[in-house]
Image (tube, rainbow, N blue to C red):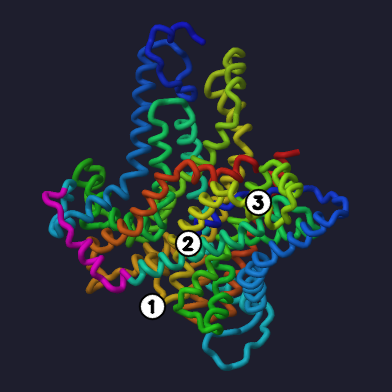
Amino acid sequence: MTQGVATAPLPQPAKPGRSYDLPQSGWMKARERLAWLLVAPSILVVVLVALYPLLQSFRLSFTNARFGSTRPELYVGFDNYARLAQDNVFISALGHTLVFTVASVAIETILGIAVALIINSNFNGRGVVRTSMLIPWAIPTVVSSQLWRFMYNQDNGVINDVLVNRLGILSSPVAWIANPSTSLSAIIAVDVWKTTPFMALLLLAGLQIIPGDVYEAATVDGASKWQQFWQITLPLLKPALLVALIFRTLDAFRVFDVVFVMKGAALDTITLAIYARQTMIDEQYLGRGAAASVFIFFCIALLVIVYSRLVRVEET
Amino acid sequence: MATTTAVRPVMPDTAMISGTRQWSLGKVINRILFWILVVFIIFYTVFPFAWALLSSIKPNAELFTSPVVYWPSAINTTFYQFVLANGDFLLALRNSIVVSVSTVLISLALGSLCAYAMGRLQFRGKTPVMYLILSMTMFPQIAILGSLYQMIVNLGLYDRLPALIIAYLTFTLPFTVWVLANFFRAMPGELEEAAMVDGATPFQAFIRILLPLAAPGLVTTGLLAFIAAWNEYLYALTFTQTRARTVQPAIASFSGNTQFELPWGNILAASVLVTLPLVILVLIFQRKILAGLTAGAVKG
């Protein structure tokens, strides 16, 4: 994932399109002209290196384009998409991506709420906890993937050592990453480690704007802590929770780094993004790979629409 | 407040965990459980990096024993010496610095101009511009990987640093615009009016008055953009090979003589070297970073 995108805030509905009084004074006119001058460079960059390549991806997905081929590209309609649907590797990549997304987001959300509640209670040293939680977020995904690969190591990894030699929970060391029955779970655990703190910090910000007197009133009314959590905390936390869920789901669905560093394009953990890159870059099937990446794009667009509906329902 | 606590030392409020304010046995157990949880959270988040740090200074023999040797018997710096004498790694380090710093500077320069217009000025077409920029923060990197790759190859930028700088702008620039626009919007309107009265042009008002006031926002967004560029892997892996390779793909592809004999000491030393500056930066600027990360979430 890319941190910059992950940290990008939620689109806020732009100010309702009220028609501004047309600038009359020279100063106002100068400001309108200035506005366009100022946004022009950014728009140029966005259009040239983001929007144009995006449209190009759509176009390529309907062609048989290949890298380094001199043969002219042909329009092939939905052939690439049809091939994807018949490709077992693509289907299993879709499966892994769905499992990864649902499992990691669900675990991160539950743990994130728990951790946020703990930090939100007022105790000495909460600053230390908050600081320590920024560390997994700051460590590059490539580095954290390597660190966990080292810890998962079958022969002399610390995780097997603790489970086998110290606690005796397992009778023999497990090849967590190499073994297809544990590999995806092991990778999900790494993602949970890396992003639960981020989730918790977003939720903590949501918790901190809930006024304390709501709880005092509830306590006076005899509500138990458990009731207060379900009746007060959770409903009031919903907006922050939805935003955090959007970020995490979008990020999880396009997962590349952690899986690729730990397993490459191995078939037991391949994800959609790895499949798309493999097809486009390594196998040079630009058209078919573009179809896979457009598929990812539409899944994510769908998620954004569904979530923003939820947010809107929440607001009305 | 409950009177039972008055004679006790002020204890932290475990609002979510304990139900009563009486010092029963249950309360004490709750306290202990609470602190165990807190310690566990800190341990869980910090351990992997601490373990890498510790392992990277172990003598080579103690790195590969079973049962694991937890505390090194002596400090061994050979892994660091090896990595710092490794030309490929030093080149990657230099490349990462150039790419990240350039990305930050360009994002801030273009982004602050655009953000000022978005945050302070009224103009027709503002809403479509905002949606265009925001939609760029949503789509996945992989969606443009192939066509960007093609574009970069055609422009002769493959395995060159500008390729990465251009590619990184796709995610740092929209983010910068968004956060800074919120920053400018929150400033009082009298600022420009005062400047106008003094005969300043709108652009002078921006450069002389608003931009300096936005310095904290520039630091936050610059920092977040730096971290994003420094940590990026997919584009770096795809658009570079040797001379423009950055640290992330370099660390990911550290290899030994055989596939089964990974040079863990070197990998860990390199990992610590590229992460430590980041961790220190984050610890110094943690308040700013937290504010930047949660700015959108709370309002949303």
Please determine whether, in this image, residue A57 is positioned above or below residue A243.
below
Residue indicated by mark 3? B181
Mark 2, residues whose alpha carbon is within 10 Å: few (<14), some, or many (≥20)? many
What residue range appears in magenta? B72-90
Return the disc, 3 or 1, that comes first in the chain's sequence.
3
Distance (Cα) linking label 3 and label 2: 21 Å
The residue at the point 57 percent across, 51 percent down is: A247
Residue indicated by mark 1? B243
Q: Secondary structure at mark 3?
A: helix
Return the disc, 3 or 2, that comes first in the chain's sequence.
3
The residue at the point 49 percent across, 66 percent down is: B102
Dot label at residue B229 = 2
Determine the chain carrying the residue at label 2.
B
Distance (Cα) linking label 3 and label 1: 37 Å
Dot label at residue B192 = none
- Mark 3 vs mark 2: give the one in front: 3
| Residue A157: quadrant of the picture | bottom left
Where is residue B48 shown, x and y percent of the image?
32, 49
| Type of the residue with mark 1 | Arg
Q: Is residue B98 left or right of residue A52?
A: left
The residue at the point 51 percent across, 64 percent down is: B103
| Type of the residue with mark 2 | Ala
Check contact, mark 1 vs mark 2: CB within 8 A: no
